[in-house]
Image (cartoon, rainbow, N blue to C red):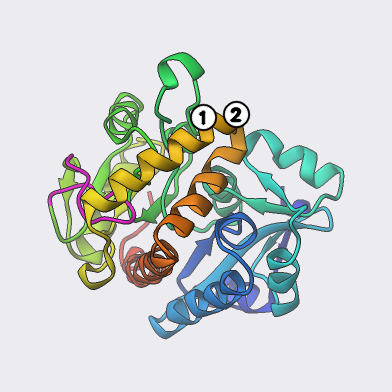
Amino acid sequence: MQRYLSFSPEVANARTAGKPIVALESTIISHGMPYPQNVVTAKEVEQIIRDAGAVPATIAIIGGKICVGLTDEQLELLGNSPEAMKVSRRDLAYALSQNKLGATTVAATMICAQLAGIPVFVTGGIGGVHRGAETSFDISADLKELAQTNVAVVCAGVKSILDIGLTLEYLETQGVPVVAVGQEGFPAFFTRQSGFNADFRLDTATEQAAFIRTKWALGLDGGVVVAAPVPEADAMPKEEIDAITLQALQQAEELGVMGKKVTPFLLARIKTLTAGRSLATNIALVKNNARVGAALARALLEFPSA
């Protein structure tokens, strides 16, 4: 496994020193935001993690290696490469063996983080069950990965473009705990409330770390969803985003957008329909997740591994 891993000097030093490390995905750079906001946001998120006492490790596939921790030049490369592959579990071996430039999804980042021994991963939102999945069978690989890979995923819930109720049902079936931070309700990315509750509420990093270590010590493999709502000042009105989401979904159906292209298309349409306000919310929630994730990474060091 180690021959596929390439650690940046910052991450390598952190591993040697036993410092807390936080994994970060790279599809948010290549597919989630436009340039230059994508690169600027990536650097700001990394700095937030450093300021919170942890070390950021943005993960991507470059030159036949899983790069754990990226240089400024590598971040720029991803931010300016529309041809970069969107790499999930299915694509990981292909991207590595064919020397493709690849940006890792939630699922692939979880796999790479576990290989690198990093138990905490911060993202914007996880994938889920798409609307109409009863006929399309469009269910994100993120959910299956959460059932089998021992990484805690800090997110702002799932996007309103998904079927949130079915997503939570799927996670329950797979035995994946969903923990909300600061509230009972499960957040819906752009909004603080989805209309559904999380399984548990754990407000502090210490509580979250104790729960996660206990889970893994019991041999209960799989991840944990740590759902932190977007800060109230940055949240969008639920009624507004729900109406816009329906409009974007209808446009995607009319244009025949399918598969991996659906989420980037919908996010781009929502950005246009909200006159850019959704992008500002997206950036704010990722930064908030970075703070929550850094605190969790630090707290996990206080609890012994199984």
> Looking at the image, which is closer to me, 125 or 252?
252
| Marks 2 and 1 in Cβ contact (< 8 Å) | yes
Q: Which residues are magenta?
A: 184-196
> Looking at the image, which is closer to me, 140 or 262?
262
Left or right side of 77 for 187: left
Residue type (three-letter) at the residue carrying disc 2: Gly
Q: Is residue 247 above or below residue 183?
A: above
Residue type (three-letter) at the residue carrying disc 1: Glu
Residue plotted at (51% across, 29% down):
253
Mark 1, other Cα within 10 Å: few <14 / some 14–19 / many ≥20: few
On the image, the x and y values in percent for residue 21 come to 49, 69
- Helix or strand or loop: what does disc 2 sit on? loop
Residue designated by label 2:
256
Principal secondary structure, stretch drawn in magenta: loop
On the image, the x and y values in percent for residue 151 come to 44, 49
Q: Is residue 123 among the parts visible in the rendering?
A: no
On the image, the x and y values in percent for residue 137 come to 49, 19
Residue plotted at (45% across, 44% down):
150
Q: Is residue 225 above or below residue 221?
A: below
Q: Residue furthest top?
A: 135
> Mark 2 and mark 1: span between their CA atoms?
5 Å
Residue plotted at (52% across, 36% down):
252
Left or right side of 241 for 120: right
Mark 2, other Cα within 10 Å: few <14 / some 14–19 / many ≥20: few
On the image, the x and y values in percent for residue 45 come to 48, 74
In reply to whether residue 193 is colored magenta, the answer given is yes
Residue designated by label 1:
253
Instruction: Give the number of the disc on residue 66.
Output: none
> Looking at the image, which is closer to me, 192 or 176?
192
Left or right side of 101 for 182: left
Q: Residue furthest bottom?
A: 51
Find residue 162 and report its image quarter: top left
